[in-house]
Image: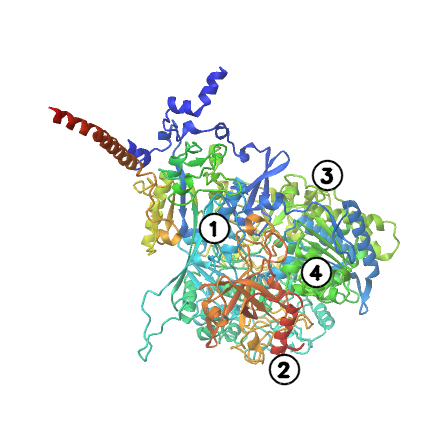
Amino acid sequence: MGVRRLLRGWPAYRQLTGGDPLGRGRAAMSGRTEALRPRTDTADRVVASVCPYCAVGCGQQVYVKDERVVQIEGDPASPVSRGRLCPKGAATLQLTTGPARHHEVLYRRPYGTEWERLDLDTAMDMIAERVIELRRATWEWEADGRRVARTLGIASLGGATLDNEENYLIKKLLTGLGVVQVENQARVCHSSTVAGLGTSFGRGGATTFMQDLQHADCIVIEGSNFAEAHPVGFQWVMEAKARGAKIIHVDPRFTRTSALCDLHVPIRAGTDIAFLGGLIHHVLTEEKDFREYVLAYTNAATLVSEDFRDTEDLDGVFSGLDEAERRYDPASWQYEGTDVQAPAGDVEQLRDQRLRDAASSSHPPPGHAETHGAGGPQAHAGAPSDPTLRHPRCVYQILKRHYARYTPEMVERTCGVPRETFAEVCRALTENSGRERTSAFVYAVGWTQHSTGSQYIRAASVLQLLLGNIGRPGGGIQALRGHASIQGSSDIPTLFNLLPGYLPMPHAHTHEDLDTFVAASRTDKGFWGEMRAYTVSLLKAYYGDAATPANDFCFGHLPRLTGSHSTYDTVLAQLDGVCKGYFLMGENPAVGSANTRLQRLGMARLDWLVVRDFSLIESATWWQDGPEIETGELRTEDIGTEVFFLPAASHTEKSGSFTNTNRWLQWHHAAVEPQGDARSDLWFMYHLGRRIKEKLAASTDPMDRMVQDLTWDYPVAGPLQEPVAAAVLAEINGHGPDGAPLSTYTELKDDGSTRCGCWIYCGVFADGVNQAARRTPHTEQDWVAARWAWSWPANRRILYNRASAAPDGTPWSARKAYVWWDADHGRWTGRDVPDFIPDRAPDHVPPPGATGPDALRGDDPFIMQADGKGWLYAPSGLHDGPLPTHYEPQDSPFTSALHPGRSRSPTRQLYVREGNRYHPSGDEPGAGVYPYVLTTYRLTEHFTAGGMSRWSPYLAELQPELFCEVSPRLAAERGLEHSGWATIITARNAIEARVAVTDRMRTLTVHGRPVHQIGLPFHWGPNGVVTGDAPNELVAIALDPNSHIQEDKALTADIRPGRRPRGPALPRLVADYRRRAGITEHTGEDQRP
Amino acid sequence: MTDSLLSGPEPDPAGDAGHAGAPPRVGFFTDTSVCIGCKACEVACKEWNAIPEDGLSLTGMSYDNTVSLGASTWRHVAFIEQSVPPSAPPVPAPEGRTELPLAGEAPAGGDLRWLMSSDVCKHCTHAACLDVCPTGSIFRTEFGTVVVQEDICNGCGYCVPACPYGVIDQRPSDGRAFKCTLCYDRLGAGQEPACAKACPTESIQFGPLDELRARAALRVGQLQAAGVAGARLYGHDPGDGVGGDAAFFLLLDEPEVYGLPPDPVVTTRDLPAMWRHAGAAALSLAGGLALSFALPAMLRRTVRR
């Protein structure tokens, strides 16, 4: 028998006796081939997970065999990705199992030159000791006579790719310790979104979800490179295109997105407000607004105070500007009939006035613009209005006057967009908006990362409100966020100025108790009226039984802000020796933040630094081999910073939730245990907190009381004592008086009977079921797919969807029906959870004196806004104006064509400091030394600061070197050769890059003359499989006053052929340029006569 | 008989390779008109097949740093930047002079086009690599695809010059020949190939070949009707020089623009003719040789009489 089988296995025998005489198929198959099985079939288990890269949040399936991950691919059941992955998602196996990951704790002693091994337990103990010591040494009970109860000696940065549960513990522990300098990538990425969308509509997140794009009749992608940065999400644009939608891409470069669009509009980087203002002008002049929508759902008819003066009246500024303080008093911006007529300046004074009159507004403190998701809570609910829209002080007329000069000619002059192209965009948008058709806007950091970033988003919001696209299917504004859970790290948040759910962090005030705090921040009308319930419930989650009505629910334990403590302020605090301890958790500021040289110099002044990441990123090794070591500016032996490197667990090694750009919370399950010393950030924060609390348990020092009161009781499981992430999510969701999980935020009470870690996430654990872990395949649901994951708030997928119906509750059209009033049942119904009070009739008028949600009318779709309306004009909430105005970027080759005497925003945040010098701009002498516009961007193949892509060979080989993109004319002008080298110089630093000469970079005609733009992808740094200089070396710190976000999308630079100098010759080159340009510490400020 | 063995119509390659009761033939339809050039296909393929990284250098060829298919690249995305001149001639300026575009720059008012296309092994109906493989390593699977058996391949390299598309190659560190398997192991378990699963815009479509061909015909008709003049199918025709490809394409320009041969022919097509000629030559030689001995003998006999 054995002989026969042997014979039958012999290919030659099979060839002679079987149906394959030539031996080209069946006969030639070897035993190995016959036995082939895919490892997706032979795995022990398949675990549901979510991609850790961008915010599309593609579903992933993780295959495990013998306790090792053997394959990761897309999850076909996911409604947003349908099984697809981009190159980064497809490289997740290499990311999580490849050789680039570290698994051992490394330690650098002060002044040391090498890394040493350190065991994890010792490292944790040392870190806990350092936190306690430094906290004690830098503790301040008061600042300027007001209680602050905090330390500015410790700071933390990260992380937008961490789980919500991890960000929750980071914020909770650090806030509990009195640390206010808590930030993450959301600050430098989409903070402008929170301010811009929040003030316009009430919540600072995308108003719709990506799959909804398939229903758009026109899509404008601007400030975004959708196909490159969110490839899998882009499939929904392709669906729209297949149905005949017009797709327009407005971008300084012709990118992979442009290649698939119907129209590419090249634009000068930094001029989108002029472009959008031009569109607004067109809509208003041609009366193409959706009039019924505008009248019923926006504040178009509301009258504004007669003290208000527009930029058209005051040559580029609004009324109320204090030039010296670089601040506005927004009192004159208010609606008519509010009582506030406060003098400019003092925050305290304005606040008192606000407290005296609950309906008036006041000067919002720094960071306030992002609170509430709005920042504009104080507007009077019942201001006078003119429904005929003719009154000169109604918002509609103010809008018309404000944008009167944003003509197609002005757009051409300022943006470099030819009139015919601009007209095409006008036509496409207006023809595709109204009852029967809707248009969508999609944007990302091309809009947010400007010194007027919040106003960019405001401009799009104004336009979409005028066109009647908000809250409607195929409409809305999709703010494409960039990291796996950056929406979460904004919601939870690890941001200095916010508490979970966009509650404001309290500022230092004399005698501020909880009631005062709430009174100053809540709205009279709408759901922010219930602010006390949200705040008390949060305090109960943080302080548990220690929080009682008698002690104001431990409100006094919270540290107080005294200004801006954003990441950039923290870097300056490090340079000034104030901040001495720093945590970096999955963030790499030495590559990813503006002015990377200052980031590193700041870290060189720290006592200690804790870095948690997969590999030895630049922010962990700068002391050994960073650029300043190369130039000689720093010497390793002279740097006293103690550095701990703790390897981090990957998303396959921990359970938790990510919140994607659809506002979905998606749960990912742990597939395997982490190896070696690698631990999750949940483990790190929990055990750090546990150790600190243990060490302080017996203390009688009053500054430790708040730490002792902090609840820190989470169950742990497994051999590594990993905290149970679901328990943290349950705390975030909240519990009722009986300890049962809450189901909706309307259950929250202000008497201490409920606890809730983040009120907008209340409902994610409804009925004790982890709603974020729901994975009903999209094939078993409609296109809204409400049974996949859970979106905030209350699982609503399109926000403000009351606006998809007319004031009488019927859909605007059958084609665009989404949510409508069911009169028979007395409820709102439709394709989504109504973003409205379920049984409030469309014609409901609230009784006089009603407050909070009770004060909402049946036609107030924007239920978070103080007047229930979308804000065309923002009477409060933003520091730089109620209406978006075009200003030039901080560094610009041009003076503003609109307001030549006021080129730049008067309230932008400047940091005058050596190492952060600005350029002369426009007609200022020396501007020609940096004659070209520079813009930074992303490539599909890499991910942000490169920590998750430059170390993966499969991604590194796709884009191995830093290159700059220039037009043929610029190349000719500067003698640049394709594939050669170039050096790019600003006043901050100089870098080198390979050259790509391409027609995709257009030379534009602006102000009648040609202007060249240089493009730089920002992913490179000196560490990894592929290395290069970091373009953020070139970027200055100049910030948007609302969001504190840097301007890296439009600056100026010079470029010349050849590699850059090495060693001390590099700073000499940069200094030489500054000298030639005549740069002083005053360059870039506004010289007022 | 030899006609269908090496060239000409071949409706059932799997069946004719000894696979009785084979499933329908499968392949790829790559619609490059919706490709966003993301290279997810390149990475998904490498991850699934554990293919090594093969080159960390900037090529300067637009966004293509992969360059070509090879032993360690089984999906390759090509990028072609094109400046299309405006359809109407430039309008003369009032003085009668015409505004000409500067040399080396896209003409004002002209359109930019960026073609992107994911190339792959064609899994030809008549596969020369398979025909010339001396060890039986390369074989025709039951799905009609062409696969290299790594455990059999001896690295002789005959297949490399045989391929009319220049797909298959030898891995320098290894010696053996490697190429796309159309994820043969996944097909066996009813799963789609890794690249098709990953593709964000479904530029790469996988399925039964008949279905794909029908879909492609509809799609190219749709594009042409919409005025996309250059839209055409490539490798779809069973009557072409390789008998049609299981992996065929919708292109927006000439194949040469994408680096593809315009008229690929299976390099073994002329083998029968060549052997016939060789045979004829041998016979002629043998015959001539025989004659050279026989003739004088015949002549001598005639002379003796």
In terms of image quadrants, where is residue A917?
A: bottom right
Q: Residue furthest bottom?
A: A1089
Q: Check disc 2: other Cα within 10 Å, few if <14, some if 14-19, many if 20+.
A: few
Amino acid at pointer 3: Ala
From the viewer's perspective, is the residue at label 4 or at label 2 nearer? 2
Labels 3 and 1 share a subunit: yes
Which scheme is used to colour this image of the protein? rainbow
Look at mark 1 in the image and give the residue it sits on: A235
The reply to whether callout 1 and callout 4 are in contact (CB within 8 Å) is: no
Amino acid at pointer 1: Gln
Amino acid at pointer 4: Phe
The reply to whether callout 4 and callout 3 are in contact (CB within 8 Å) is: no
Which circle's residue, 1 or 4, is located before the other in the chain?
1
Residue at disc 4, secondary structure: loop
Amino acid at pointer 2: Arg
B51 to A828, vertically: above or below: above
Residues at marks 2 and 3, CA–CA distance in whole angstroms: 64 Å
Front residue (pair A726, B24): B24
In the rendered structure, the answer to whether residue A848 lies left or right of residue A222 reads right
Residues at marks 3 and 1, CA–CA distance in whole angstroms: 40 Å
Q: How many marks?
A: 4
A782 to A932, vertically: above or below: above
The reply to whether callout 3 and callout 1 are in contact (CB within 8 Å) is: no
Look at mark 3 in the image and give the residue it sits on: A717
Residue at disc 2, secondary structure: loop
Look at mark 4 in the image and give the residue it sits on: A496
In the rendered structure, the answer to whether residue A336 lies left or right of residue A118 reads left
Labels 2 and 3 share a subunit: yes
